[in-house]
Image (tube, rainbow, N blue to C red):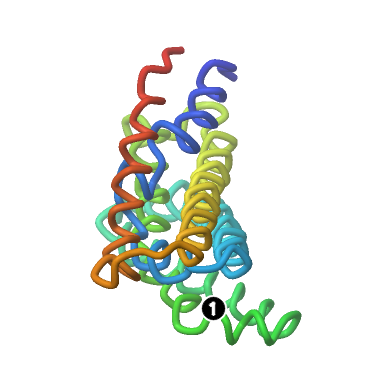
Amino acid sequence: MDLSLFLSIIIGNIFINNFILFKFLGLCPFIGVSKKTGPALSMGVAVIFVMTLSSIITWCIYHFLLLPFNIEFLRTISFILVIASSVQLAEMVILKTNPTLYRVLGVYLPLITTNCAVLGVTVLNVNMFFKGGYAPSASFLYTVLQGFCAGLGFLLAMLLMSGIRERLQLQDAPESLKGIPAAFIIASLMSLAFMGFSGFKF
């Protein structure tokens, strides 16, 4: 088990290779749910749950089913089915425990199914931690850690964005910049700021 690889996965997925601010994946819920901190926090937690659970299940499917039977070409479709099932589970849990939050999240909760960031992390796990058709030692731990930390990076971006947008609502901004235009400008500036972390070396 490589400690430096553990650290690079944690810091890399949260700060350096943030799925929203560096890879520009998952912009739909990022823009749509980041108007208020409460819904942004809930969406971020839901994405962490889905990313982590999907990483675990897709690793098992790829390792125990797709590779042994030489059907790796079914990777994308099987991963999408796993993500859709995970989102349905998260949706049922939120509906049962907090109906108000379920209504606030609205259409963006089912949209996690089509959130390319979730599919991106599962595909990245396979590409990074399966070498030559087999899983090296500790690849399962690396996969789970990467899924969880990618979700944390998503949550961090959501909270930063929602905090800035809440403050902007109190300002007298030009009408042409309110809403989506301001959101894209903020996202661009945040992305530029996060590029400063790319200088980290391990």
Q: Residue at x 59, y 17 (%)?
A: 3
Q: Amino acid at mark 1?
A: Leu
**Residue 179 image-quadrant placement:** bottom left
Element at badge 1?
A: helix
* Percent position of residue 170, x then y: 51, 65
Q: Residue at x 29, y 53 (%)?
A: 185
Residue 67 lies, with reference to residue 167, above or below; the image says above
Q: 122 or 149: which is nearer to us? A: 149
Residue 177 lies, with reference to residue 16, above or below; the image says below
Disc 1: which residue: 105
Q: 83 or 200: which is nearer to us? A: 200
Instruction: Give the left or right position of residue 27, taking residue 113 as reference.
Output: left
Instruction: Give the left or right position of residue 115, taking residue 43 as reference.
Output: left
Q: 198 or 74: which is nearer to us? A: 198
Residue 140 visible in this rendered orientation of the protein:
yes
* Percent position of residue 80, x then y: 38, 67
* Percent position of residue 13, x then y: 46, 37
Q: 198 or 182: which is nearer to us? A: 182
Instruction: Give the left or right position of residue 50, taking residue 84 as reference.
Output: right
Q: Residue at x 42, y 13 (%)?
A: 201
* Percent position of residue 119, x then y: 37, 57
**Residue 108 image-quadrant placement:** bottom left
Residue 60 visible in this rendered orientation of the protein:
no
Task: Count neighbours of disc 1 (C-alpha within 10 A) and say few if under 14, some if 14 to 19, many if 20 or more.
Answer: many
